[in-house]
Amino acid sequence: MKSVVSYPERGNYGKSNWRGNTSGLLIKDLIEFASQNTRTPLNSFLFVDACEGSGTSGDVCKELNCQYVGLDLHKGNDFTKDSILASLPREADTVFTHPPYAEMIQYSGKQWGNQLIESDLSNPKISKEEFLERSQLMLLNQRDATRTNGLYATLIGDMRKKGQFWSFQADYQNMMPKDELISVVIKMQHNCKSDNRTYGGSFIPILHEYLLIWKKKGASIYKVVWDNALRLKRSIASSWRNAIRLAFMKLGGKATLQEIYKEVEKIAGNLIKNNKNWQAKVRQQLQYHFRNVQRGVWAV
Ligand SMILES: C[S@@+](CC[C@H](N)C(=O)[O-])C[C@H]1O[C@@H](n2cnc3c(N)ncnc32)[C@H](O)[C@@H]1O
């Protein structure tokens, strides 16, 4: 497998009429790579697809003669509520997901079943924030079901709707431990409904999706969640610092406390809206990271 892949043919796997299905050739390459990377021969390799859709992964595993467990909401397995690990005979060598790209294609009530299921990740009634929150649960769940030094991977695309562009893969990368990500593979898309449309050239059509691959280290699921929270806390602190640095840029590198407050108010409206003590926060950052050059005057 290379960092850019393209499979114009989907191979004889899964069902071609299942909207949003993926090429079995990608799954085959992923399993062969994972088997080598984890030094696990195919005949003792356990591959899990936690949203198997039309069964593409199952067909590939049959051909490769490796063990397989396929789960999906349409079989009653909800990766936002049910532990994936609890459905397995043992921790998997690789857990893969190919979730809906938000509401781009609706599954329950359209592709299968006769009503929309609330926890379906393609539920058009949930916000993108909610979609991402549930996606993180999916990723943590699949990581939890992966053995230490095994791989977990997800196939996800970008979305453009009503003039807004969502790069879900960027959010997905941010949600999981940075030191576990081992590859980002760009997969060209073929046979999409949009292939036959012509565009006026006012925006760039999306022709690819991403396969993100992580290798699980030993940390417990709770540590991963906690580390994420710490990372967010650090990113808030660095946002404060950068807001003040920007204020100094505007003010020529040296300013009074009142001038800094005024500028920060303009720059960081969102940060201070819900923080009654924001001026104390600015003073604290000034003390830590900037120079007090004379009474009430600060400099970078
Ligand atoms: C893009 S399709 C997967 C297609 C599959 N890779 C194939 O080749 O056929 C996404 C799947 O995610 C499933 N899904 C949506 N929400 C889910 C949830 N909360 N738990 C488990 N599966 C879910 C849908 O039922 C759908 O089958």
Image: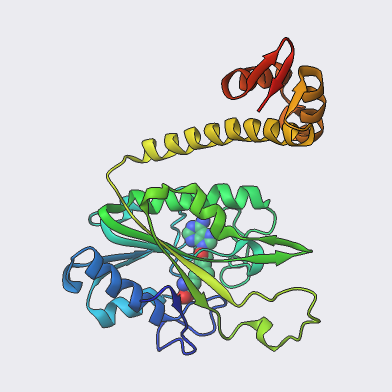
Instruction: Report the front residue among 53 and 108.
Output: 53
**The quarter of the displayed image where residue 293 is located:** top right
Placement of the C terminus among the 4 image quadrants? top right
Residue 264 in percent (x, y) is at 76, 29
Q: In the image, what residue occupies the spot 78% across and 19% down?
A: 256
Q: How many marks?
A: 0
Given residues 149 and 283, the one toward you in this image is 283
Image coordinates of residue 66 in percent, x first then y, are 23, 73
Drawn side of residue 82 relative to residue 33, left or right? right
Q: How is the image coloured?
A: rainbow
- Residue placed at 60% from the left, 78% from the top? 207
Nearest the viewer among 70 and 264 is: 264
- Is 115 placed left or right of 152 in the picture? right
* Residue 64 picture location, percent across and down: 25, 80
- Most distant residue in the top direction: 295
Residue at 72% in and 36% down: 246
Indicate left or right for 60 with 199 as reference. Answer: left
